Image: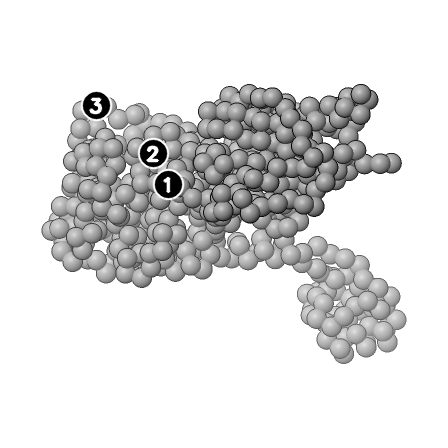
Amino acid sequence: MVIKKNINDVEIGMILAQEVTGPQGVHLIPENTALIEEHLTKLKQWNIDYVFIKVESEDERIEKEEIKTRQIFQKAYSNAVTCLQNIKQNISSEKAIKIEEIEAPVKDMMAKVNENRDVLMQLTRLNMMENHLFSHSINVCVYALVVGKYLNLAGEQLLELGTTALLHDIGMVKIEESLWNNNRPVSDNSWQHIKKHPHFGAEILEQSGGYSRKIIEGIKHHHERINGSGYPLGLKGDEISFYGGIVGLVNVFESLTAYRKYREPVIPNEAMKIILAKGRNHFAPEFLRALVAHIAIYPIGSLVMLNTGEIAQVTGVNPEHPFRPKLKVLFDCERNQQTKARRLDLKSKKHETTYVTKTINQADIDNLTSKQ
Amino acid sequence: MTKILIKARFVNPFILCAVKTMKSLLQVDAARADISMRPQPYAGYEVMIILGVAGDIEGQVIYGMRLGVALDLASRMMLGVPLDNLDEMAKSALCEMALITFDYTRKELVEAGYECQVTPPSVITSFLTKGLEMDISTVRIRTLIVPISYAGGEIEINIALREKKA
């Protein structure tokens, strides 16, 4: 944003948006200069009445910062992808997977969750890649860490949970990719084979050595359900390991909301409804609660309609207040696209009576805005 | 007689919208039972959600219920997450429900000729004392009590509103 300022209102530290020129176009002070006292005196001596000053709104500052953080986090995300690629190769050539190798990206993600959970979660939505096994594993790891932190895990335990999550589908490497990564739903025959992946995964880690019992069990149990309807063992209730239960839940959530070659992603809010319709019998209540508290009513990245008529995108979550997300307004109430995104935090006092009326998708926005 | 008729004009939207919101927001059928009057809102609820109203009509609207009902409503708001205590998140869900219900109502009120605004909702609980220690003494407006029943139990809407004198 640029404003024209009278010379009497110009203060030290303001940044010039345009160079100051004298008679005959003499260059006096260049653009982008941060003004010091000397400049102010000179400007007055030169009889200059006004200058153009750059001002950054709070929203612009937040936007800038977020972009910067996102770029840094994206590097961590890409490193995790590389790590998984290496591991996949190691498995193919029957080499062991060193635990230190896998812990590095998990530790990195743990640091990022602490630093800025919201931005890390934005990334999970942005990284839906062709080879969904990698992005899926990393996203599940991020969600598991967020849920785990909420359940008061820390240090070694959180690291173990994150490792379990990042490696939960590692057994898929032993299954021919054409069976699961194609553009049709899986056939019954392939399904029977795919159902062995938790077992294969646990086997790989057992052979590699260095992985705790809890991690191996977590991987083995990530498709078990508390009512016994899961696979491969059909375990019930407490028989399912703690990590296995958490990873199992966030795994379903991620799978539903991610892109697949053969279907459109489910809106996160709908995904949660689908999970909860069965959830009482499938997952421990405290895990469901943690997922809803932090991730799922209006998850980061979702598009929402407000009672004010504005259309916004969720940029952050206020823990314990899943109905009061942090937002970026994309369209105002007259459906004009906003070039400078306005931020609102529904948890702030100012917006206490504003609320989300519904979750929408891109197609809804196209419909709503094209009518104008 | 006139007094009661005028009152019906702004009370009806509350009754209609409570039932309508339950249906659209929580996907449950709800029905209204017999309406009664009290000199002031009843205070013996385990959980109360209080909304202040200001504008052409003023006063308070209080949704009163037992703890079990509050948990059931909060759980339904949260897409069915099982809840066993009324923590911050559950309270937040109840406030959201009250806010949305009031907003539907406000639209109808505007059509009936009443402009009004709402204060952010607050939740008051007294289930630890079984509702015995609570007294609402600041509101001295004749109160209409509208019981709404649904599969999870009963909610009483206490409508303590009056027209603002011009």
Residue named by callout 2: A280
Q: CA distance from mark 3 to mark 1?
A: 30 Å
* The N terminus of chain B lies in quadrant: top right
Would you call the spot at circle 1 few (<14 residues within 10 Å), some (14-19), or many (20 or more)?
A: many
Is B46 or A326 nearer to us in this picture? B46
Picture quadrant of residue A171: top left
| Rendered residue at 31%/40% (across/down) | A284
* Label 1–label 2 contact, CB within 8 A: yes
* Three-letter residue code for mark 2: Arg
Residue topped by disc 3: A188
Q: Position of residue A311 (x, y in %)?
A: 61, 37
What residue would you read off at disc 1? A288
Compare marks 3 and 1 and give the one earlier in the sequence.
Answer: 3
Q: Chain of mark 1?
A: A
Is B127 situated above or below A109? above
Which of the marked residues, 2 or 3, is nearer the chain's N terminus? 3
Whether marks 3 and 1 lie on the same chain: yes
Under mark 1, the amino acid is Leu
Marks 2 and 3 on same chain: yes
Determine the CA span between mark 2 and mark 3: 27 Å
Q: Secondary structure at mark 3?
A: helix
Query: Do we see residue B36 in this rendering?
Result: yes
* Element type where label 1 sits in the image: helix
Element class at badge 2: helix
Q: Which residue is located at x 58 percent, y 48 percent?
A: A347
How many neighbours does mark 2 have within 10 angstroms: few (below 14), some (14-19), or many (20 or more)? some
Q: What residue appears at the point 31 percent right and 61 percent down from the top-left corner?
A: A155
